[in-house]
Amino acid sequence: MVFPVSGVEVFPLVPFIVAFIVSFFTSMGGVSGAFLLLPFQMSILGFTSPAVSPTNLVYNIVAIPSGVYQYIKEGRMAWPLAWVIIAGTLPGVFIGAVFRIKYLPDPKNFKFFVGCVLLYIAIRLLYDLTGRAGSKKKKTRELEEKFKERSNQIRSGKQAGQLLRLF
């Protein structure tokens, strides 16, 4: 099958299967997975035009709401943090799109940039596995415990409310 806008020729189920696998694993970590689809689109499908970026943004619009809904339903959404992140995300999306179109339209330069970002993420993930990083995680664990307690309180309150509605 040929996707006429991108000029990519591939068996139609390949993008579907890759998107499913990426979404399955990345939703567990609370990320959309578009950062993994980007290398797939550019390296495997050969889709290197600046249109690859809005394609990933559309993926985010479709992939994120169901995960967000599930986390809200379970009472695991940290709203103060979420609002701060949203406030930084909105201008970042617009500035990033302009930067991509204006300064990185060449696929070679964009691939290098994406490679640097992915390399940084890989280094951070590997660093987190070291003992040095483990000692710094004590505060994080304490915060996680407080968050779990609060989530359990919210869930208990919802369950009690549901039981009261039954009677």
Image (tube, rainbow, N blue to C red):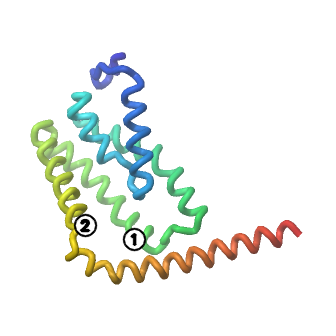
Disc number for residue 129:
2
- 93 or 48, nearer to the observer: 48
Q: Residue at x 40, y 22 (%)?
A: 12
Q: Secondary structure at mark 2?
A: loop
- 35 or 13, nearer to the observer: 13
User: Can you name the residue that lies furthest to the front here?
Assistant: 131
Disc number for residue 123:
none
Q: Quadrant of the N terminus?
A: top left
Q: Secondary structure at mark 1?
A: helix
Residue 58 seen anywhere in this rendered image of the structure? no
Please state if 127 lies on the left or on the right of 79 as rendered: left
Q: Residue at x 11, y 45 (%)?
A: 112
Q: Residue at x 20, y 42 (%)?
A: 101
Q: Residue at x 26, y 28 (%)?
A: 45
- 3 or 75, nearer to the observer: 75
- In the figure, 160 relative to 2: above or below? below
Three-letter amino acid code of the residue under disc 2:
Leu
User: Where does the image place residue 102, in percent across and percent down from the top left?
Assistant: 16, 44
Residue 133 seen anywhere in this rendered image of the structure? yes
Q: CA distance from mark 1 to mark 2?
A: 28 Å
User: Where does the image place residue 147, in percent across and percent down from the top left?
Assistant: 49, 77
- From the image, state whether disc 1 or disc 2 is nearer to you: 2
User: Where does the image place residue 20, in percent across and percent down from the top left?
Assistant: 43, 38
Q: Which residue is mark 1?
A: 84
